Image: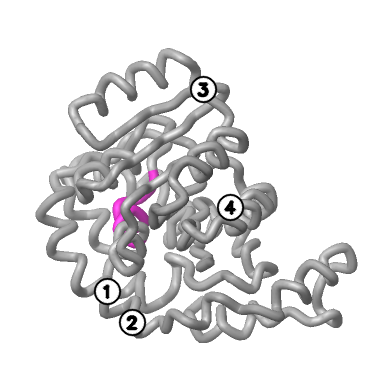
Amino acid sequence: MGFEDEVTSVFITKDNAPNNRIEEIMEDAKNPKWENMDIENFKIQCSESISTFKEKVFPMSHLDNGILIREGFAFCAMCDYFSVDLIIESGMARGMSTEMFAKYFDTEVISIDNALVYGTQIFNNTKNRLSKYHNVTCIMGNSLKKIPMILNSHKDAKVGIFLDGPKGKEAVKFAKKCFKYPSVKFVGIHDECFPKRYHEMDLWNKTFFYTDADWFMDKYYNLDLLGEEKDQLKVKSDILDFNPNGHGIGFAIN
């Protein structure tokens, strides 16, 4: 799906919305925040960010349960566009996205994981590996509780949030709570191009962009072939053959 299709899909009406979502959707539709950022401006931002991203982030090996490199690039370009000075990540796993953000930015990166999926040992190993980055703070805990606390203590910041847990509708529900804070400029939700929950953010009219958009795939697909070759080709075999567009990130603008 290209951006042109995505634009039409966010204008939900009572005729095509689930009954239990009508009031919520129509309330959102009164104030479409995303329209203030034109997709052409974001394309320009991507073209300006890509050389710096390659210079700072590569070489980059894929880690199990990590996002694709092009997905990390999309998030970094969004941060550039909004001059973000604080990144909050929910769902660190083995820290691949965390490390990309830490390499690309000097700004503070706070990553939170409850360690329930991958365990305490993986969390501690990842925290130790990322300790070489001065701008990274790893927190074990519940993001639904920790992120509001962080936002309350950083009211003057420009914040970009990456949610890789919770997923799907629960992630959208939490993102809406985050958008009550003016400091939050955008939220990126991972796995929004995963077949099981494909583009679930479409029901939220603040949705701006998915990383499976045709223009983005055409130009930045090869980022996942530019890291350490053996690892990156394994990613292509294990992930991209199953879902060529990747699990994807959906972005919403506050």
Closer mark to the observer between disc 2 and disc 4: 4
Residue type at mark 2: give it: Asn
Judging depth in this view, the residue of 49 and 249 nearest the camera is 49
Marks 2,1: beta carbons within 8 A: yes
Is 168 on the left-hand or right-hand side of 49? right
Range covered by the magenta-colored residues: 67-74
Query: Against 242, is 37 above or below?
Result: below
Separation (CA) of disc 2 from disc 4 = 24 Å
Residue type at mark 1: give it: Gln
Residue 28 visible to an observer of this rendering: yes
Residue 241 visible to an observer of this rendering: no
Closer mark to the observer between disc 3 and disc 2: 2
Residue type at mark 3: give it: Ala
Separation (CA) of disc 3 from disc 2 = 38 Å
Q: Provide the major secondary structure of the magenta segment.
A: helix
Separation (CA) of disc 2 from disc 1 = 6 Å
Q: Quadrant of residue 37?
A: bottom left
Q: Residue furthest right?
A: 19
Residue position marked by numbered label 2 in the rendering: 41
Q: Does the stretch in magenta take in 68?
A: yes
Residue 89 position, x and y percent, is 44, 42
Residue position marked by numbered label 3 in the rendering: 115
Query: Against 215, is 58 above or below?
Result: above
Q: Secondary structure at mark 3?
A: loop
| Mark number, residue 45 | 1
| Label whose residue precedes the other's in the sequence (2 or 4) | 2
Judging depth in this view, the residue of 215 and 31 nearest the camera is 31
Marks 2,4: beta carbons within 8 A: no
Q: Does the stretch in magenta take in 95?
A: no
Residue type at mark 4: give it: Cys
| Label whose residue precedes the other's in the sequence (1 or 4) | 1
Residue position marked by numbered label 4 in the rendering: 178
